[in-house]
Amino acid sequence: SGTYSISNLPCGATVNWSATGNTTFNGGNATGNSVTINNSGTEVITLTANISSACGNFTRTKSITVGLPPLSDGVTTVW
């Protein structure tokens, strides 16, 4: 799991989050300037924040690698 946020939002801005893969939002909450995601897989996901404000609508995305890294076989090749 991890927590992601957007700072310095204009007053009255709303943020709706979405994510790809096996991602769920902690407590089912996918709104607000901060969100905690959970993912049980090992994959690269895209976290998207859709921001709506009086200044306009904006979308921000972030690629995140989740899960455990691949295990090394412990073999080192020396040439």
Image (tube, grey):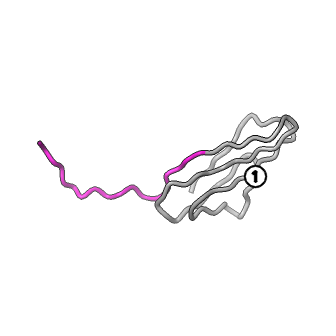
Q: Is residue 60 above or below residue 22?
A: above
At 83% from the left and 38% from the top, the residue drawn is 56
- Principal SS element in the magenta part? loop
At 75% from the left and 52% from the top, the residue drawn is 16
The reply, left or right, for residue 38 in relation to residue 42 is right
Viewer-side residue, 5 vs 46: 46
Image quadrant holding the N terminus, namely bottom right
On the image, the x and y values in percent for residue 71 come to 32, 58
Image quadrant holding the C terminus, namely top left
Secondary structure beneath label 1: strand
Quarter-of-image position of residue 55: top right
At 67% from the left and 42% from the top, the residue drawn is 60
At 57% from the left and 62% from the top, the residue drawn is 21
The reply, left or right, for residue 72 in relation to residue 30 is left
Query: How many other residues sit within 10 Å of disc 1, few (<14), some (14-19) or many (≥20)?
Result: some
What residue occupies the far left of the structure in this picture? 79
On the image, the x and y values in percent for residue 31 come to 76, 54
Residue 77 highlighted magenta (yes or no)? yes
What is the number of callouts on the image? 1
The residue pinned by badge 1 equals: 16
Residue 11 highlighted magenta (yes or no)? no
Quarter-of-image position of residue 37: bottom right
Q: Is residue 36 above or below residue 78?
A: below
Amino acid type, residue under disc 1 in the picture = Asn
Write the start and end of the magenta stretch as one range. 62-79
On the image, the x and y values in percent for residue 30 come to 73, 57
Quarter-of-image position of residue 61: top right
